[in-house]
Amino acid sequence: MSQNGNKKAFYPDYLPFVLVAALIAVEAIIASALLFPPRIGPAIDLTAPYQPKPEWYFLWIYQLLRYFPGSWAIFGTVLLPALLILSFIFMPYIDRGPRGRKKSLLVGIVLFTSLAVLTLIPVLTGR
Amino acid sequence: MQRRDFLSWLLKSAYAVLGLGCVATLPYLYRGGNEDIKTFFVKTVDEDDLPRRGVKEVEFPFRGLTHKAFIVRKNTDLFVLSPICSHLGCSVNWNFVNNEFDCPCHGGRYDMSGHVIGGPPPKPLTRLPYVIKDGFFYIGIRA
Amino acid sequence: MIRRIINLLDRWFGTKEAHRNFLARALPGKIGVSYCLGGMAFTAFLVSVLTGLLLSIYYVPSGTEAYPSIVTLHNEVWFGWGIRSIHKWSANFLIIFVALHAVRVFLHKAYRPPRELNWMAGALGFVLIMASGFTGYLLPWDQKAYWATVVGTSMAKTVPGAGGLLVRLLRGGPEVAGATLVRFYSMHVLWIPFGLMLIFWTHFHMVKRQGISGGL
Ligand code: HEM
Ligand code: FES
């Protein structure tokens, strides 16, 4: 298999590296867990003023909701998130034809920057 | 050939049964409408403690949790507003500095009558029914 | 000793033979660390499964007992807080690793034929992982969990026509209540992990058959 000069075999050439990477992942998780343990939040209280925040990986939807008042709400809650997710899933079919890669790069960059910006706004403004 | 046709028919009907089975789980997951929604009148404050003017927040127990509602007296009108934001269901607070209800979630704002004056809510705050009986103020909540 | 056990197992199951193609598969000569991200994501998933199994020993999925059971788990069970913490952090790292893995695949154009199905399998896995994070967020049944789920499930209400039906389907009733907690728990510990394992299995098999794309 590895007769071809610039090819290598998964085993024994790469497997050790993958195992080291896995170990690093486990250590990063455990170190963060020991350094920053979660707290127990207050019990459910329907009377206290409370602003729930989602996990950081849902902040983009949270921010999106603010832009669509009244009957436009469905754009923020369903349509735009669905468009985002579908264009991510069907990326291989966006990259079709002679200018395929250009199209998919465009979509990819738009996806990435909108997610990043929508996540950063609530993080930075603290709302 | 006869046998082959039969087998392929069998296979197709097996797929159909499988597909129908999947669709049938949806109403199962939905749980059905066995519980009918009714209005329960819950005892809150003494009639004498109703606000003369402005907004008063009241708390009352219902099904193991403490709920809240706003009793509003505007001119001669008396009505009760549900705290549930018409946008996505957070609990609004009375802001006595600006005389408005503010939603902490996405910045919804309502005036004293519950009409939307800002932010994403599509509808006014819900008005809850009430009765005054034996000197107490009862608020009706639908559950 | 260990070698002998491995050889014995191999004689029974033929593991090495079946995976010879996987182990000896040719890879591009120059590969960077970014190729490890998928494996790191899988590792984080395994950590979340292990700690999740441990949490489920003490956690009680019921409207009245979920919160006290978390308090007991966190404060009284030996290292309970630590298992909880590792579970949470494994979820965060899982999302980060999967996202970076997807970026790596995208930059290398490795979603192109013949790998388009594998891209879609991975993307679907990403969606399931997000769903796992959403359902898991409710389980502590505290203030944050409750209101985040009220808002999150209300989003389905905005769908014209079917909105009310969808919200009830998600909540198992008109309000976020004990019934919601139970179905989120079921999704979180049974449906989604099972779905993810199926997806990972197809994902890795396709990697084996199609190989790693030859770099840039
Ligand atoms: C087989 C796999 C899993 C099992 C059996 C499991 C089980 C559990 C249990 C019993 C809880 C409640 C305890 C607690 O809240 O601390 C929980 C919480 C949670 N899980 Fe999982 N889980 C699994 C995988 C995942 C994955 C893949 C994610 C990825 C996003 C995830 C994210 C969460 C989150 C965010 C919480 C809330 C933690 C907290 O607030 O303390 N879980 N899980
Ligand atoms: S829930 Fe009140 S503004 Fe969104």
Image: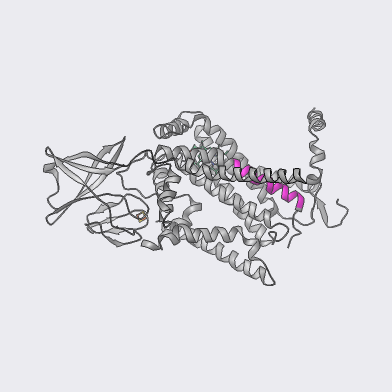
Way the structure is coloured:
one colour
Residue B137 visible in rendering: yes
Magenta residues, start to end: C194-209
Magenta highlight on residue C207: yes
Give the farthest residue toward the front.
B2
Q: Is residue B18 above or below residue B107?
A: above
Q: Camera-side residue: B96 or A111?
A: A111
Q: Position of residue B70 (x, y in %)?
A: 23, 49
Magenta highlight on residue B80: no
Q: Camera-side residue: A115 or B137?
A: B137
Q: Position of residue C86 (x, y in %)?
A: 55, 39
Q: Camera-side residue: C195 or A110?
A: C195
Q: Position of residue A12 (x, y in %)?
A: 81, 45
Q: Residue at x 49, y 28 (%)?
A: C77
Left or right side of C185 for A70: left
Left or right side of C123 for B94: left
The dominant secondary structure in magenta is: helix
Q: Residue at x 57, y 47 (%)?
A: C93
Residue C140 visible in rendering: no
Please count the marks in the image. 0
In the picture, the quarter occupied by the C terminus of chain B is: top left
Q: Quadrant of residue C107?
A: bottom right
Q: Camera-side residue: B78 or A47?
A: B78
Left or right side of B34 for B46: left
Give the farthest residue toward the right.
A3
Q: Position of residue A40 (x, y in %)?
A: 42, 38
Q: Is residue A117 above or below residue C141?
A: below
Q: Residue at x 50, y 32 (%)?
A: C80
Give the farthest residue toward the bottom.
A98
